[in-house]
Image: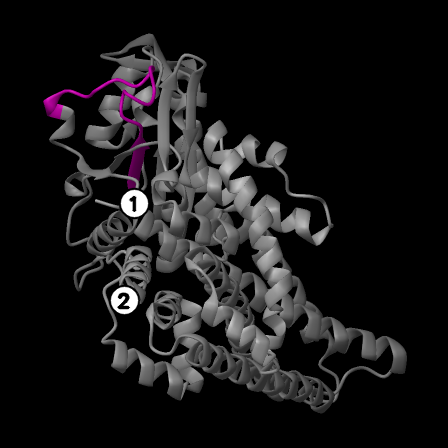
Amino acid sequence: MNIRQAKEQIKNAMRAYFLKDEYGNYRLSTPRQRPVFLLGAPGIGKTAIMEQIAQDLDVGFVSYSMTHHTRQSALGLPFIEKRVYDGVEYDVSEYTMSEIIAAVYDSMEATGRREGILFLDEINCVSETLTPAMLQFLQYKVFGRHRVPDGWIVVTAGNPPEYNRTAHDFDIATWDRLKRIDVEPDYNAWRDFAVQSGVHPAVITYLDIERDHFYRVETTVDGTSFVTARGWDDLSAMMKLYEEQDIPVDELLIEQYVQNGEIAKRFSVYYDLFTKYRADYQIDRILDGNADETVVERARAAGFDERVSLMGLITDALSTLLKEVVLEDRAAAYTFNVLTEIRDEAQANETTADVLPLIRAKAAEIQRKIEVERNAGLLSDERYVSYERTLALLDQAMRAETTGGAGVALSAVKEMFDQVLDALDVHIAQATSALDNAFKFVEDAFGDGQEMLLLVTDLSVNRYGMAFINDHGCERYFTHNQNLLFYERGTDLVDRINQVSVEEDEDER
């Protein structure tokens, strides 16, 4: 299965494992909660999806790479304890708590989450001295004398032996106690993630054209060359930072992440062409509704590669804008809840004339949340924006007190929040207009062709795009979605665009 299917399978298993009966006991007893084993090629996103699942389910998350562990760190250090048996005192070997199990308890104490996911990566690459203990752990969830706390689900991952010479297989008795999920590289599944997470449009559109360059591992006379999903994702992040600083994105940078000489060179050439399209088409003007007719005519006459690049630029700019608005909208909802708590406490204490102490306490509480959730790998983009926007408003209120010197009235804080809502309304109106203008441009240039299908599909797989449309509407989206009958994502969009081009060429002949 692909990584998207694996994520759903694991999330469903986690939901089942966390179910409790009317007495608060887990419906599936801890011994029967099989550890999940993700087996797949390196760099396809196994660790990333586990972090996403923990954030989606709002549970704790502890991650370890087992290649870094020795028998002592996994099992604990030995010490001598006195024991009396039948009136005779003996020296008995005991072990301190495993570093891994201790990390679970530390996470529980820091985050307050009693349930979570313990993720152990590269589980089948442990040292020979640790292998017996690891097999025992997979079967009984015990390191030495210490058990994984109830409510914590074990998920493991590893690479097949063909990708890692230190990997070894398990016996049937061990496999029979695991929930095994084999994961294969799949561009369509990764593309949905890439659109949603804002991977650089040059990467997405290049791979739309050269799909066999998405994942490749080859052994040549010069050694092993490879390209992975993780490599493209990391390259994308670096490209964005380089562009912000006006640092050239060249082949020397690309080949540090795309470790296949031919593919690195071809992507470098494509990126240069992509940046030319970005300058020529001026996407901001398209989203503002001010695109020149010459731009529409050029798009209409463009070749296959140029059309794919243009649509990538439009959907990327649109997705970025819609994500910003959705996060701001949800941040405003979080801020409202925080201010409601401050109001209720102030009214109960009859201190509405000065809520400064309550504001300071709430700001400190949110700052602690940021630090704890970041350290625990639970700080999603949405939470981070909500926390930071709320802190910004509370800081504005505290600075107002410093200026006036007479405390901060609840009414003054409300006025500040009203200004936040006014700015949000403006931002929502701008995004609504940009969404409509993007559809209008694609209508004018391509009609209901494959480019429109690409726009509708990318908005549909983007949770922020759909969140915005569901909350604020978009008549053109629903019209084109119905007209196109919304093809399944598994269909190869680029092949269909190619097919249209071929048919048009044959008609001209």
User: Can you give x and y, in whole percent of width and height, for residue 311 in the image?
Assistant: 46, 65
Q: State the residue at coordinates (42%, 28%).
A: 226
Q: Residues within 10 Å of mark 1 (few under 14, many from 20)?
A: some
Identify whether 213 is placed above or below 430. Answer: above
Q: Which residues are magenta?
A: 153-173
In the image, taking residue 235 as reference, residue 83 lies left or right, namely left
Q: State the residue at coordinates (14%, 20%).
A: 171
Q: Which residue is mark 1?
A: 186
Q: Which residue is mark 2?
A: 507
Viewer-side residue, 132 vs 495: 495
Secondary structure of the residue carrying tag 1 is loop
The CA distance from mark 2 to mark 1 is 34 Å
Q: What amino acid does circle 1 point to?
A: Asp
Identify whether 204 is placed above or below 472. Answer: above
Q: Nearer the viewer, mark 2 or mark 1?
A: 2
In the image, taking residue 199 as reference, residue 213 lies left or right, namely left
User: Can you give x and y, in whole percent of width and height, for residue 82 in the image?
Assistant: 38, 13
Q: State the residue at coordinates (21%, 44%).
A: 1
Q: Residue furthest front?
A: 509
Viewer-side residue, 50 vs 23: 50
Viewer-side residue, 388 vs 25: 388
Q: What amino acid does circle 2 point to?
A: Asp
| Magenta-drawn stretch, dominant element (helix, strand or loop) | loop
Q: Quadrant of residue 321?
A: bottom right
Q: Quadrant of residue 427?
A: bottom right
Is 441 magenta? The answer is no
